[in-house]
Amino acid sequence: MRLRPWLNSLLLLFLTTTVCAYVYKDYDENLLLKTLPNNAVLASFRFVTNGTYTNHHSLFPRSLAQILSHSNTRELHLKFTMGRWDAESWGAQPFNGQTAGGTGVELWAWVEAVDGPTADKRWTTLTNALSGLFCASLNFIDGTRTIRPVMSFTPDGDHEDMDRLHLLHGSLPREPVCTENLTPFLKLLPCKGKVGISSLLDGHKLFDAQWQSMSIDVRPVCTAPDSCVLQLTQTVDMVLDVERSLQRRDYPVPRPRPREELNCDPNKPYGADGSPCFPRSNIADLPWSISEVFGRPLHSYCPLASEPAEHVCLDVPQERPIYITRDSIEVRHPDGRRCYTLPPAGDFDIILPQQSPALPITPFPEPPLYASRSFTGHGQEHGGVKAVIKNPHPTRPVEFVYLESLPWFMKPYLHTLKTTIYPAPPATGDADLESPVTALYYRPAIDRSRGTHLEASLLLPANSTLILTYDFEKAILRYTEYPPDANRGFDIAPAVITVLKHSPSPQHTLPYTISGAPIQQGHGRVAIRTTSLLLSLPTPDFSMPYNVIILTSTVMALAFGSVFNLLVRRFVGADEVAGKKKFGTVVEKIREKVRRLKGKRKTE
């Protein structure tokens, strides 16, 4: 029996409402905007989706679920990071550094397998599939770039059998992060970047930031033994320069500003003649808004997100005025944050007027450690690495794990590993107690098969600095193993520092309303990554092989042509050619042509 049109519409509305009521609990999105010193703004986007491995995918992306299921991956962490986080000016990284990786691409996962070789095969399947999904060179994470960390990483999800899980880690510090990676990232979201918080993610703004990171984290979350979901957390963190964004708005084509528009500091002791200009900082808080910084306002919220929810949170000094559009609800938190619920329809914008003089800005809390790393030595045969790690806390020692993943052509000498603490701790007479190294794991490299894995657990006293150094030898590569820009050098992955037993700050979290799936990361650990290094190896002159090839080819062509002519060509007389007139010499040919011409003239 055919139903009436109004009954069909009513049934469709009922089913849509039922499905939406179910999926509303499985997705949430939030945005945190925090002002930083020197007119910088931290924009932290966070999207959380709950799902399963089953064939029914309401919001959880099916493409990612199939990859995880086929490769038996139980937990996944993929990071795309570019730029440098200025910890001295901005404080600790948001979310304790758990949502950011090293420069380039960093990937680690827990793969379920019965033994190591099986885990390696599934790891290869995972990297190749993710390479195609995110348009990145993850397929180049082979055995030479893969390690198995022992002390640095712990699983964030709820796993039943940890004995069958294998942790594998790989990185590509040379990988450039661009729009090709952002587009697949947005396609994993339910609203695909068309509406809601994700509509602000534009490649022109994201990749123009001073520091930016894209994170994809998948982990199982269980609220009960028989109630588990697969939680996908997508995070985008970026630090935008307000002055640069406003300048791009006024001048789309970058050009130097006139000198009269620059705020020069005349009190600098150098440059007294006035020719150089050293800019002054913290003169005033420049005016900005969401539409000016991101190029567009927020249009409603994703209809699949949970409601009511605090979609946008703003962390600015309390004295600074804020103007928002109508039809939005403001909620003030005790820590000073002001959060807003987006209207169901219409554009939403936040406007901050200019503030002069600049208000004091409280950055994120001070990080537990400051770390830097650099090369030492000179020459093309040997070198060294120097890592400087500082504990700024006046009374609390810090226990941390230092992880190095080095390529096979960078061969460290373990006996040269030295640790020095300044100021020196009081002598106790026991050398083992005076050493900051509490545990050490070292796996040497094998040429063209695997890299070096160095992992050390250290204890740094309060208000002291640790200097870790070691020497290494540079290998000589085959000419086919050099990249096209060999003289630029080889990128070395950043060192990973994991601070153990650290209490996270409440300013590092955001309010989320995902029902039945609490959000937790790192179990109180803080992740810090140093900058990447650029290693210079002995590089041959690639123009010489080109010259040799050209000269050899020329000689071979001349020799082959001469020998071939001698072997194949047959010299015969002109009178021996059948079917042609017999001309004795060239002179006779010319005479014959002249006679023909004279004969034609006589006939005319």
Image (cartoon, rainbow, N blue to C red):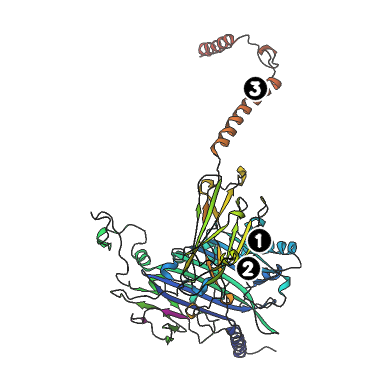
The label shown at residue 151 is 2
Question: In the rendered structure, are the residues bearing label 2 and label 3 in contact, judged by CB atoms less than 8 Å apart?
Answer: no
Q: CA distance from mark 1 to mark 3?
A: 52 Å
- Of residues 51 and 503, the one nearer the viewer is 503
Label 1: how many residues lie within 10 Å, few (<14), some (14-19) or many (20+)? some
**Which badge, 2 or 3, is on the more N-terminal residue?**
2
Q: Is residue 359 above or below residue 204?
A: below
Q: CA distance from mark 2 to mark 1?
A: 27 Å
Tell me if 184 is positioned left or right of 200 in this view.
right
Q: Given the image, on which type of amino acid does mark 2 rest?
A: Met
Tell me if 489 is positioned left or right of 155 in this view.
left
Residues rendered magenta in the picture: 309-324
- Of residues 569 and 206, the one nearer the viewer is 206
Q: Given the image, on which type of amino acid does mark 3 rest?
A: Ser
Q: Given the image, on which type of amino acid does mark 1 rest?
A: Asn
Disc 1 marks which residue? 128
**Foreground mark, 2 or 3?**
2
Disc 3 marks which residue? 562
Q: Residue at x 24, y 56 (%)?
A: 272
The label shown at residue 282 is none
Instruction: Report the residue that reaches farthest toward the front.
Output: 429
Residue 137 position in % (x across, y down): 60, 58
**Which badge, 2 or 1, is on the more N-terminal residue?**
1
Residue 142 lies in the magenta stretch: no
Picture quadrant where residue 167 is located: bottom right
Secondary structure beneath dot 2 equals loop
Secondary structure beneath dot 3 equals helix
Q: Does residue 411 appear anywhere in the picture?
A: yes
Question: In the rendered structure, are the residues bearing label 2 and label 1 in contact, judged by CB atoms less than 8 Å apart?
Answer: no
Q: Residue at x 62, y 25 (%)?
A: 558
